């Protein structure tokens, strides 16, 4: 944190807020024992900072300053309540806060412990999934309610309500502000990782609407995983998820054109991939897979992503090993979406005919009905088999189901290519292998 | 802030399945319940607890426009029925969840954990 000298403008104060909000809130919740009271105290502490810092300069330890001011604001607030309502319970609470030791200094890692407690509270399984995601982004990442609402395409009022209800439940149900007991830890960490991954996938490919990627959400998810990895070091499940997100995110720049169109994996300009992030992700996967016990689903998926990322060009991809990893994934964590991805990989090793058999068997079970990538993959295999009429039908089915604009445009493009191909064929020019799309990875388009 | 909370653990089980358990099964269940109840009494977490007669013995009462309407039921339309409860004291929800997970019926049915409302 910055020292006392030097000028302070609003941007500076803003930046400190953004950086410190999560940690300060986490510590305030421990000190005052109530989520909403702590949040109000935090807002008041920030208001005080806006007033005082521009003239006095940033304090040497902004975090501790904010905690101390926030703590006093909370006491003031309780005193006012006591004056109005003379509540016995508030009196006891106030006395308890006043007894707490002063804000911990920055060196002590109590801040880390507080943050970890807050993460587990926000991701508690007693909260519904939407509430967990919203609370995590608001309280831990320090996003504004408006920003969280925007990210999930709901009205700010709706999001504010969701957050209020979640905080009430934390208070009324007695959701603890504690690191879970050892026998609950694995299950709870799994829950936290699910929230982080949900934030990431929402940032990686939003489920509907215009933009394919929301950089901010993906970055927040990575930041959260890094934080969790630092707070609970050496856990293979956390490393696996962090690796998976780093590897997917490394391709960000190459995944869309400037106009926002999808660029499929095989057509991506690999020089745009973030090599540093790929190296970090690959290192983490290797470590995660070496850990004893059965690998987490994230680790295996990350290993697949690493093989894609390490191939110097598309043809150099080690599809055989990718098929093998999908088979591991299917054995450990069976899922129809994984089966779909497995079939795509099989098409690269044994050809589209073999893959089509797998897809048709999968479609017959009906578990993926309504999922646009099933007909999209099918269409692609049919196209590669030169069964154009069937391919077109399948693309149309996919188009009717796809909701994300860039995905729809890609499907329209594919249909148009098939129309043109007919002309080409009449001139004796085949279009085989021109741009066979691959749907790889859990979000489909890699 | 250390404050004890009270939670009601509502025990839901499929009555039809429970009836099929037979005498030995019932005895085993009773033993498990006795052991569990003893353990939470000793830990100072027990406030109250009872098993209920099946829903076939139940009566539902409503008062509408001053008139009392008494009916039989509720009928076992849902998959699981309320079969008993514990009122416990716990530090927080996680402690309550840990206790709920030890209720013998948790392995067969489900336990709903509800915080008791505090007024004032």
Image (cartoon, coloured by chain):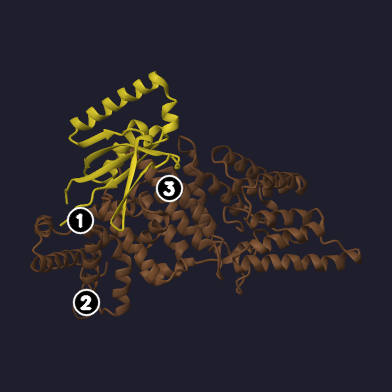
Chain colours: A brown, B yellow
Q: Which mark is residue A238?
A: 3
- State the quadrant of the N terminus of chain A: bottom left
Residue A140 location in percent, x, y? 34, 60
Residue at mark 3 shares a chain with residue at mark 2:
yes
Question: Is label 2 or label 1 in front?
Answer: 1
Report in which chain the residue with disc 3 lies: A
- State the quadrant of the C terminus of chain A: bottom right
Q: Which mark is residue A415?
A: none
* Left or right for A283, reference B50: right
Query: Which one is earlier in the sequence, the residue at label 3 or at label 1?
Result: 1
In front here: A427 or A402?
A402
Report in which chain the residue with disc 1 lies: A
Element on which disc 3 rests: helix
| Residue A352 seen anywhere in this rendered image of the structure | yes
- The residue wearing badge 1 is A33
Q: Which quadrant would residue A263 be assigned to in this image?
A: bottom right
Element on which disc 1 rests: loop
Query: Which one is earlier in the sequence, the residue at label 2 or at label 1?
Result: 1
């Amino acid at each position: 944190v910055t020292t006392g000298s030097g000028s302070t403008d609003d941007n500076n104060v803003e930046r400190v807020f953004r950086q410190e909000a999560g940690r300060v809130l986490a510590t305030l919740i421990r000190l005052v024992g109530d989520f909403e009271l702590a949040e109000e105290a935090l807002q008041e502490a920030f208001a005080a900072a806006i007033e005082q810092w521009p003239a006095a300069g940033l304090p040497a330890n902004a975090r501790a300053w904010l905690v101390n001011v926030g703590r006093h604001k909370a006491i003031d607030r309780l005193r006012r309540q006591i004056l109005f309502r003379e509540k016995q319970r508030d009196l006891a609470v106030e006395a308890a806060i006043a007894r707490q030791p002063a804000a911990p200094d920055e060196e002590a890692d109590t801040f880390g412990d507080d943050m970890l407690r807050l993460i587990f509270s926000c991701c508690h399984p007693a909260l519904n999934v939407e509430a967990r995601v919203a609370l995590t982004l608001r309280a831990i990442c320090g996003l504004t309610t408006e920003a969280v609402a925007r990210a999930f395409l709901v009205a700010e009022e709706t999001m504010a309500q969701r957050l209020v209800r979640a905080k009430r439940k934390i208070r009324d149900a007695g959701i603890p502000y504690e690191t879970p007991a050892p026998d609950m830890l694995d299950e709870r960490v799994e829950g936290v990782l699910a929230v982080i991954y949900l934030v990431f996938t929402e940032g990686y490919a939003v489920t509907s609407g215009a933009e394919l990627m929301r950089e901010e959400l993906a970055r927040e998810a990575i930041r959260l995983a890094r934080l969790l990895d630092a707070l609970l070091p050496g856990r293979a499940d956390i490393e696996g998820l962090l690796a998976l997100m780093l590897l997917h995110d490394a391709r960000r720049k190459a995944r869309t054109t400037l106009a926002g169109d999808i660029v499929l994996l095989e057509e991506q300009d690999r020089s745009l991939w973030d090599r540093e992030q790929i190296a970090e992700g690959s290192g983490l996967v290797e470590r995660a897979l070496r850990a004893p016990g059965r690998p987490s689903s994230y680790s295996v998926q990350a290993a697949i992503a690493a093989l894609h990322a390490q191939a110097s060009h598309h043809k150099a991809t080690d599809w055989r090993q990718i098929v093998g990893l999908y088979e591991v994934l299917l054995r450990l964590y069976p899922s129809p979406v994984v089966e779909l991805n497995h079939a795509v990989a099989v098409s690269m090793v044994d050809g589209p005919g073999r893959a089509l058999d797998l897809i048709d068997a999968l479609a017959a079970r009906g578990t993926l009905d309504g999922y646009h990538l099933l007909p999209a993959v099918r269409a692609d295999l049919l196209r590669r088999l030169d069964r154009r009429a069937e391919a077109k039908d399948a693309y149309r089915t996919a188009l009717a189901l796809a909701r994300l604009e860039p995905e729809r445009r890609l499907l329209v493009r594919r249909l148009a290519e098939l129309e043109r191909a007919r002309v080409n064929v009449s001139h004796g020019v085949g279009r085989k292998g021109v741009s066979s799309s691959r749907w790889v990875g859990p979000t489909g388009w890699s | 802030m250390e404050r004890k909370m009270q939670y009601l653990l509502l025990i839901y089980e499929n009555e039809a399945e429970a009836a099929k358990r037979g005498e030995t099964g019932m005895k085993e269940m009773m033993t498990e319940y006795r052991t569990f109840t003893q353990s939470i009494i000793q830990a100072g977490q027990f406030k109250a607890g009872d098993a209920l007669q099946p829903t076939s013995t139940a009566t539902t009462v409503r008062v509408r426009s001053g008139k009392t309407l008494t009916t039989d039921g509720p009928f076992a339309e849902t998959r699981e029925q309320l079969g008993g409860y514990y009122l416990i004291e716990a530090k927080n929800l996680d402690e309550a969840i840990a206790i709920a997970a030890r209720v013998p019926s948790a392995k067969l049915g489900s336990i709903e954990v509800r915080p008791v409302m505090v007024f004032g």
